Image (cartoon, rainbow, N blue to C red):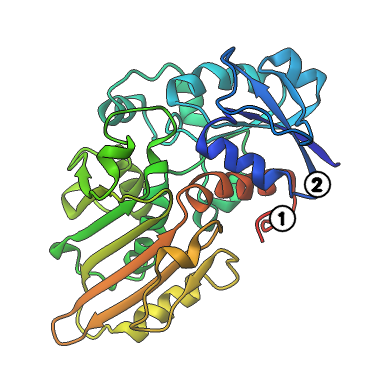
């Protein structure tokens, strides 16, 4: 094995997905880093190979010669752990929202809590490879993007950069996610009886992923309407994005823009005009699938962007970032 990598928070949904992906990566050996004393939620499977464990400490990171530490932990835990992991010589890929925004004030506004590591917040590289690849490769600390912003920015930014969107008409993002996006910690709103045979919007106007979309796309808050909704399924994100086009633009032009922007990108797939992706197409993959349909007479366009929230929206993208950090092919372990 070329590198040892550590996973903190491996019992959560994103952490477990990281273990699954990294165990098939041909160049890394994952080590599970224990930062809690509670027993595992499930009994061990008889005969299963034991995964290497180590304490979640700077000493263990040095002793195990860990190159990259993944933090699949809540933001406050990531802020607490990241300095020690970096000081021990590891690079860090954080899957929480702890280091995604640019200022402590922005973090406090959207996350309703103080930021305890402002120096690291300023240092962190935003880990959306399709737009930030060069900075990621040389960074010590990667802020893995949120699931909703990943799907939104991959769909929206190329069109804004190309100047084909009538921004005065606003951009509407109607976003739906499976329940695993809320994490594994029990809560009433994500319990079986509340979710099954139900469908609900939440965090209207104040969803903490909104500033990530604005930061990467270049939209102003007044130009962007985002509503998150909880689907009664385990995983997957599908975003239906409504916008108006400037005169003379049609579906063929939008696809031309996407094709030029994503030429050579291994994890963005485009559909023919009028064909739209669904969740089955991206389940358990690191792909973002994008389809467009346009009503040329009115200039209305609908873009549908679909990802697996636990893969391209979390663990898969984190491994994509790790590959960039360590110089491996970006697709290693993901195809």
Residues packed near mark 1 inside 10 Å, few (<14), some (14 to 19) or many (20 plus) = some
Q: Can residue 143 be seen?
A: no
Residue 24, percent from left and from top: 74, 49
Q: Is residue 73 left or right of residue 156?
A: right
Identity of the residue drawn at 22% across and 66% down:
242
In this rendered view, identify the residue nearer to me: 287 or 213: 287
Q: Is residue 317 left or right of residue 251?
A: right
> Quadrant location of the N terminus?
top right
Instruction: Determine which residue is flagged by label 2.
Output: 27
- Residue 18's place in the image compared with 89, above or below, is below
Identity of the residue drawn at 60% across and 71% down:
264
Q: Earlier in the sequence, mark 2 or mark 1?
A: 2
Q: Are marks 2 and 1 in contact (CB under 8 Å)?
A: yes
Identity of the residue drawn at 35% across and 59% down:
238
Residue 232, percent from left and from top: 32, 49
Instruction: Determine which residue is flagged by label 1.
Output: 332
Q: Is residue 15 left or right of residue 301?
A: right
């Amino acid at each position: 094995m070329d590198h040892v990598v550590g996973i903190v928070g491996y019992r959560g949904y994103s952490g477990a997905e990281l273990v699954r992906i990294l165990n098939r990566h041909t160049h890394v050996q994952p080590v599970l880093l224990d930062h809690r004393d509670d027993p595992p939620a499930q009994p061990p499977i008889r005969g299963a190979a034991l995964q290497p464990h180590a304490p979640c400490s700077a000493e263990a990171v040095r002793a195990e010669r860990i190159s990259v530490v993944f933090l699949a932990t809540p933001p406050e835990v990531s802020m607490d752990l990241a300095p020690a992991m970096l000081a021990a010589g590891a690079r860090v890929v954080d899957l929480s929202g702890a280091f995604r925004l640019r200022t402590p004030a922005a973090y406090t506004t959207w996350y309703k809590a103080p930021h305890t590591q402002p120096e690291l917040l300023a240092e962190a590289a935003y880990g959306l490879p399709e737009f930030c690849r060069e900075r990621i490769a040389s960074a010590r600390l990667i802020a893995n993007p949120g699931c909703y912003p990943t799907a939104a920015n991959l769909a929206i930014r190329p069109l804004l950069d190309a100047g084909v969107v009538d921004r005065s008409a606003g951009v509407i993002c109607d976003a739906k996610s499976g329940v695993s996006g809320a994490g594994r910690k029990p809560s009433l709103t994500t319990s079986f009886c509340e979710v099954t045979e139900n469908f609900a919007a939440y965090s209207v106007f104040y969803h903490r992923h909104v500033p990530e979309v604005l930061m990467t796309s270049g939209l102003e808050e007044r130009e962007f309407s985002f509503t998150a909704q909880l689907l009664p399924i385990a995983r997957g994100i599908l975003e239906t994005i409504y916008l108006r086009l400037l005169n003379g633009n049609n579906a063929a032009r939008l696809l031309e823009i996407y094709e030029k922007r994503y030429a050579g990108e291994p994890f963005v797939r485009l559909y023919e005009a009028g064909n739209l992706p669904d969740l089955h197409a991206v389940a358990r993959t690191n792909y973002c699938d994008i389809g467009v349909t346009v009503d040329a007479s009115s200039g209305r366009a609908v873009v549908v962007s679909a990802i697996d929230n636990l893969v391209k929206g979390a663990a898969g993208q984190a491994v994509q970032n790790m590959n960039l950090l360590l110089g491996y092919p970006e697709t290693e372990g993901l195809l």
